[in-house]
Image (cartoon, grey):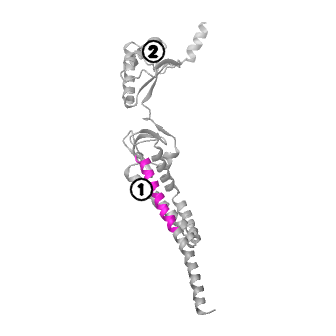
Amino acid sequence: MNLNQILETISKTIGIIEADRIFPFIFAIGMIILSIIIAKGVSVFLRRSLRDKFDKDRLGILLKVSYYGIIILAIVLALPVLGINTSGLLVAGGVTGIVIGFASQSIVGNLMSGIFIMAERPIKIGSQVEIDNVTGFVEDIGIMSTILRNYEGLYIRIPNEKVFTNNITNISANIARRIEYTIGIRYTDDADKAVKIIADLIEDHPFVLKKPTPDIYVDALEESSVNIVIKAWAPVAQWYATKRELLWKIKTNLEKEGIQIPFPQRVIWFANEKSKDNKLN
């Protein structure tokens, strides 16, 4: 083999090696470019879908996380194509991830729960709710926690994981809310008359709804009283004021007609008096 043949063989070998390196490199670059396009598309989709559900700052954080997350994932997948061994990185990342996972389990849970709450929107800022035995108004819905203001004006922070996993009673979700009383009258009072007085008061009250129809009935015969149950509906915005006002009107109007709410009563028999009665008989 002469010198020219040797050089020709070397050049062909170099060309094959370069070709073997160029195509994976082009493929890897193509994967990264495609991931950038996909990341932009996902960002546009999320922005249009969630702009009414997230405020500007939180939506910006979510878009950045999704955008760079897709690109980083594409880079990790492209490294083996270039012949770079990622097993060491995966092992180190796996160990680190386990350690961080145990250390920040609650943080990640609160973060994911916050994202789901903002996406699902079971509650809104200003809603009157009951969560985990805490009742109040929603002041803020954050990534990590939700802030409630109770009826005493105290601000209470509830982790989003508790908000997401507990039952949520949204008091202000419906347009109407029921008012319910149980009022006792004496056995000597006229129950029909008491029911009519209460029915007239409910009929004349401007904020008591006609539908659903109010319901007034004798519910129980207790030791000291005949119990009348009253059920009526009022708009959520006027529910509390209507409940207070109507109860006071029922009390005062029953008293005007001589119908009283009795105190608990007990009949006591004395042994001496009972024995005297037996002797007389």
Q: Residue furthest bottom?
A: 2
Q: Quadrant of residue 91?
A: bottom right
In this rendering, is residue 6 above or below 214?
A: below
Dot 1 crowding, Cα within 10 Å, few <14, some 14–19, many 20+:
few
Q: Nearer the viewer, residue 252 or 83?
A: 83
Q: Is disc 2 surrounded by few (<14), some (14 to 19) or many (20+) residues within 10 Å?
A: some
Q: Residue at x 45, y 15 (%)?
A: 195
Residue toward you, 223 or 196: 196
Relative to 196, 87 lies left or right: right
Residue on which the image places disc 2: 195
Residue type (three-letter) at the residue carrying disc 2: Val
Q: Per the image, is 196 magenta?
A: no
For the C terminus, which image quadrant? Answer: top right
Q: Left or right: where does residue 70 sit relative to residue 278?
A: left
- SS at mark 1? helix
Amino acid type for the residue under numbered disc 1: Ile
Residue 276 at x, y percent in the picture: 58, 11
Which stretch did the figure color magenta?
28-51
Q: Which mark is residue 61?
A: 1
